[in-house]
Amino acid sequence: MLIKSAEYVISSPDFTKCPAPDKPEYAFIGRSNVGKSSLINMLCDNRKLAKTSATPGKTQMINHFVVNKEWYLVDLPGYGFAKVSHNARNRWGQMIENYLRKRENLVNVFVLLDSRHTAQKIDLEFVDQLGKWEVPFCLVFTKADKEKQKTVSANIRSFLDAMRKTWQFLPPHFVTSAVKKVGRDKILDFIEGHTKQTGLSS
Ligand SMILES: Nc1nc2c(ncn2[C@@H]2O[C@H](COP(=O)(O)OP(=O)(O)OP(=O)(O)O)[C@@H](O)[C@H]2O)c(=O)[nH]1
Ligand SMILES: [Mg+2]
């Protein structure tokens, strides 16, 4: 897919304030600092589109972008950020659960995982939750430029093996580097294929 345009639309504090659900939507989620905003910028070929930061917890709202005037891309706040209060974490949980379960045009969630680490409990719990809610998702192993390919492969295997214990079918997965622009075409092709199937787009 060729990116002809990518524009920021709105930041919403909860799902009721999101734009009208009139286009297929793809959301990016994962631990704080895993590289969600960087991946979005890499996909859209615009380094300034979504705000990135070396400090975890940068993204706090549901951020909508419209790509090619055809589909929505959503940057969500990260989970597992230790430095937030219990209340803030509960608020995050409610906001994300409502969004993920009620957003009717949501086609797929990309769950980002840091390819430098083996399977983490918090990520496994999150994908299990998505399964219970019947939200379709893919896995994206980020920051692949930061580790040897062998380690990245071993970490991916570690996550998929952990999932196999409870999942009968494994979701699709992608390996990315925002720095080296790895994984861009595959993710955009996935989105293009699904967008064509939804019947929501023009
Ligand atoms: N080397 C390398 N660094 C990356 C990559 N992706 C992100 N980073 C760095 O990781 C840090 C966090 O990136 P963000 O894109 O802001 O992460 P985020 O998941 O949006 O973070 P929150 O919004 O705080 O949840 C930044 O310093 C990025 O430059 C990558 O593919 N390779
Ligand atoms: Mg972010």
Image (cartoon, grey):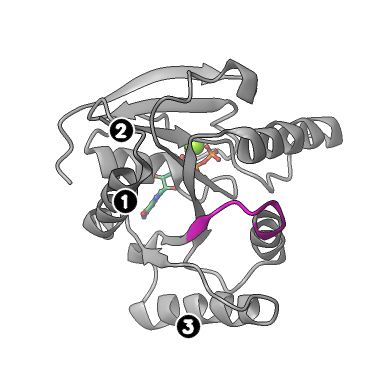
Q: Amino acid at mark 2?
A: Ser
Mark 3: is the Cβ under 8 angstroms from ligand 1?
A: no
Mark 1: is the Cβ under 8 angstroms from ligand 1?
A: yes
Q: Residue at x 69, y 51 (%)?
A: 133
Residue behind mark 2: 201
Local packing at callout 2 (Cα closer than 10 Å; few below 14, some 14-19, many 20+) is few
The answer to whether residue 69 is magenta is no
Q: Position of residue 26 (x, y in %)?
A: 43, 41
Could you tell me how far apart the alpha carbons at marks 2 and 1 are, in whole angstroms? 27 Å
Q: Amino acid at mark 1?
A: Ala
Front residue (pair 4, 53): 4
Q: Residue at x 48, y 25 (%)?
A: 21
In the picture, measured across the screen, residue 19 lies left or right of residue 8, that is right
Q: Is residue 52 visible?
A: no
Label drawn at residue 124: none
Local packing at callout 3 (Cα closer than 10 Å; few below 14, some 14-19, many 20+) is some
Residue behind mark 3: 154
Q: Residue at x 60, y 28 (%)?
A: 60
Residue behind mark 1: 178
Q: Which residues are magenta?
A: 131-138
Q: Amino acid at mark 3?
A: Ala
Above or below, 155 against 69 in this view is below
**Marks 2 and 1, the one that precedes in the sequence:** 1
In the picture, measured across the screen, residue 195 lies left or right of residue 22, that is left
Question: Are discs 3 and 2 less than 8 Å apart at CB?
Answer: no
Local packing at callout 1 (Cα closer than 10 Å; few below 14, some 14-19, many 20+) is many
Q: Secondary structure beneath disc 3?
A: helix
